[in-house]
Each structure stands twice: as structure tokens, then as C-alpha cells.
Amino acid sequence: MKAQRLHYLDVLRFIATLGVICIHVSSKEIVSALASYNWYLSVFFDGLVRWSVPIFVMISGTLFLNPAKEISTKDIITKKIARLLMAYLFWWIFYSALVMAWHYVFDDVFVFSLELHYHLWFLPMLMGVYLFIPCLRKISPDKKILSYSLLIWFFYISGSFLFLNDDIQISQLFQLNSVVGYSGYFLLGYFISTHSVSKKQSRIIYVLGILGLLMTISGCVFSSVYMGRTDLRFFEPLSPNVILTSMALFVFIKEKFTNKSTNKSTEKNKFINSIRHDLFGIYLIHPVYILIFNHDMFRNICNHIVTIPAVIVIVFIFSLYTTKLLRLTPLRKIIE
């Protein structure tokens, strides 16, 4: 039985891609002088879209835990994980070479480095979660077990967040861990996609989501000012505030675009439909254009409240058309 395509997932994937670009563009100013104008702008834009990576994982959970989607353990390893591994190795080598070439050309120094580029961490994490799919598919059909698992996951994340030492990043705590942590988002995406909520419940979820968003931004600001250094704990995807915001956004988009999963919707949403196969490629390629367009030469043309969104749009457009060109070549296998 072939699963029906859900248009709201394409919408979520599109805004999550923009969100990731926003994080990587705005985070440059995180190293600015604490509590400066540019620092506050960076915290605002960065904190506003911290749901981006969780949304990607929740989309995967919706698709891979769907009982209508037949997938064997062999297919998970030989098709899904193998494809991600191939992309991971290619782009690791590509960005290592790019960074070395950049330093050599612009800094007149040769720096040998095989350090993983900042955005590629997502791929091994996702490969790890994929290995859990057979187990997660055993949990997901039973509503009680699924609900219980999600509660345990949320309280575990919340407890770890509250009692964690200031000098330890949450991501370090979950080295085991990020896989287990993000598996919760996998289950959460499936849970939301298969369960309807009443208007009253959705309002509660939206309020919690807004509170989570406010906690993300204000928590970073107040904690950083208090500690005298930028504190990014509230930006961690595996934090209760980001979980609440991610959940609320997923519910909101699902409600707004439900019953728009067929041909009728694709006619009305031609743009998103035309780029939905390019979004993974955009994720992989966009740091190239951030390196070019996020330079101070462009950022300082006018107020950063204007240039940050402008750079995000420019990076997205260039990454989109580069992806479309690469899909015409044999390299399409590592961007699809």
C-alpha cells in the first residue's frame, strides 16, 4: 500500500530549510560583544528558528513510522543509511578541501584540516536514529506505549536540562545520546501526524509553544548577561523549550495544510512542490554561499536587521539553483 503524500510536510521541510540557513547566517554575530546591538539581533534571529532541526527529524518520523510505508531493516541499511553515508563522506571531503583552499587563497596560509563542517553533524545523527527505526516502529502503533515513551523522553530531557552543569553542553551529555534524544522527535512527529487535537488542545499547545519560544530567546539573553558570556543552553534542540516550540509549529502547519495533500494542493502551491526535491541539497550546499555572502562586506551595507534576512534569501536562492544544476549531473545521488 502506497502512503499518501502529505503537503504539510513539504511546507514544514521548506520553512525548516530556511530556518537552518537563518541559524547559520545569524550565528556569526553570537561572537559579537556581549549585549551589543548586533548580539541582540543575532540572539533574536537565531533563537526564533531553533525548531528547524527538530522539525526535520519529526518529518522523518512521520514518514518512516507510518504503517502504510513498507520498509525492511535491509532497506533501511542498504538504501537510506547508505545514501546518507555516501553524502556524508562526499561533503566532508568537499568542505575540508574548500576550507583549506579558502585559507590558502585569502589568508595566504595552508592549513590542513579534516574537521567536520558545522552543518554535517546532522547526517550521522540521522543515520543513528535510522538504526532505531525497527524498534520505534514496534512502539508507534500502540498509543499508550507511544504516549508513555514521549512523556518519559520529555521529562528526561527537561531533567537533564535543569540539572546540567553550566560548563557542560547538553549536546555533550547526549553523545550516547543525541541519537536517543532525537529519536524522541522521531516519535513525536509520528504522534502529531496521526492524532487530531481539539481547538482547545491546539490553543494550549500554541500557548506552550510561544512560551517555549520566549524562553529560548529570553533565557539566552538573561543567562548570558548574568554569566558574562554567551550561554547557548537554551538554544539546544534537546531542551524542553525547543521541544514545545517545535511541537506547536508542527501542529500549526498540520492544521493549516491538512486535507491539502493531493493534486489540488500541488496546483495551488507550485513553488513548494517544485523545490521539495531540492531541499536536502540546499541544506548540504548553503554553507558555501554563507561563506561568500555572509562576509562583513555585505553585512555592513546597512543595518543588520535588514542585511541578515537579505543574506538568508540570497543564500537560499543561490543554493536552490546550484542544487537544481547538480541534479542534472551524476552528483544528484548525493543531494537527493
Image (cartoon, grey):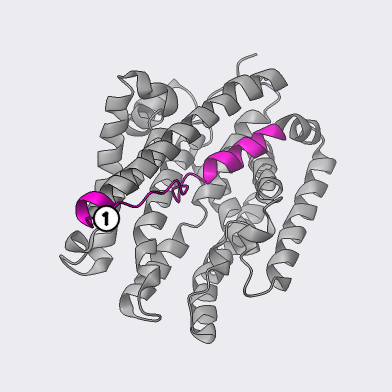
**Horizontal side of residue 214 vs 271, given as left or right:** right
| Residue 49 x %, y % | 46, 57
Residue name at image x 61 percent, y 63 percent: 241
Which quadrant of the figure has residue 79?
Answer: top right
Look at the picture and state if 74 lies above or below 240: above
Would you call the spot at circle 1 few (<14 residues within 10 Å), some (14-19), or many (20 or more)? few
Which quadrant of the figure has residue 31?
Answer: bottom left
Residue name at image x 32 percent, y 47 percent: 100
Nearer the observer, 102 or 172: 102
**For the magenta stretch, what is the residue range?**
103-132
Look at the picture and state if 211 lies above or below 321: below
| Residue 316 x %, y % | 30, 44
Callout 1 amino acid: Val
Look at the picture and state if 262 lies above or below 197: above
Seen as rendered, the residue at the extreme top is: 1
| Residue 199 x %, y % | 62, 51
Any magenta on residue 114? yes
Q: How many marks?
A: 1
The residue labelled by disc 1 is 109
Q: Quadrant of the N terminus?
A: top right
